[in-house]
Amino acid sequence: MLRTMEDYFLTFRQNMKYYREAKHLNQSELAIQADSSNGNIGNIEAGTSRPSFEMIVKRARALNIHPADLFLRNASQSRQAIKTELETTLINDIRRGIREKL
C-alpha cells in the first residue's frame, strides 16, 4: 500500500516526539539544540506546522539520528510490534520446529 504525505507527516511527528522523549529532552531543549523555537517544535508535534528540509536535518542531528529515521516507521510502535511478533509467532514457530525435528 502506498503511503500518503499525511501518513509520512504523522510518522515524522510521532518519531520526532518519540526520539525527543527517549533522549529526555523537552521541546525547549530540542529547539535550542536544533536552532529553532520551542513553539515550532510544539506546532510540528501537534501537526499544525511542517518543517523545511533544513529543519528536519537539524532536528535529526540534535537527536543524534539519521533524518530517515524520522520517516521510516513509527519508532514507538515498531519496538512493541517486534516484541509481539517475537513473543507470539516466531517463538511458537521455533517450538513447533523443535518438536517436529527432535
Image (tube, rainbow, N blue to C red):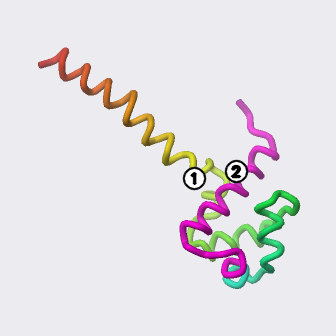
Relative to 97, is 4 above or below?
below
Prevailing secondary structure class for the magenta stretch in the rendered image? helix
Residue carrying label 2? 11
Q: Quadrant of residue 97?
A: top left
Is residue 93 inside the magenta stretch?
Answer: no
Seen as rendered, the residue at the extreme top is 100
Q: How many marks?
A: 2
Q: Residue at x 75, y 83 (%)?
A: 35
5 vs 90, nearest the viewer: 90
What SS does tag 1 mark?
helix
Is residue 12 inside the magenta stretch?
Answer: yes
75 with respect to 32 (left or right): left
Residue carrying label 1? 75
64 vs 21, nearest the viewer: 21
Q: Residue at x 62, y 48 (%)?
A: 73
Residue 66 image position (x, y, % from top left):
59, 64
26 with respect to 90 (left or right): right
| Magenta segment | 1-30
Q: Residue at x 57, y 46 (%)?
A: 77
89 with respect to 74 (left or right): left
Residue 17 image position (x, y, % from top left):
66, 63
59 with respect to 85 (left or right): right
Q: CA distance from mark 2 to mark 1?
A: 8 Å
Seen as rendered, the residue at the extreme left is 102
- Please rate how many residues cluster around mark 2, counting C-alpha atoms within 10 Å: few if below 14, some from 14 to 19, many from 20: some
Q: Earlier in the sequence, mark 2 or mark 1?
A: 2
Mark linked to residue 48 = none
Three-letter amino acid code at the position of disc 2? Thr
From the image, which quarter does the C terminus lie in? top left
Q: Residue at x 80, y 63 (%)?
A: 44
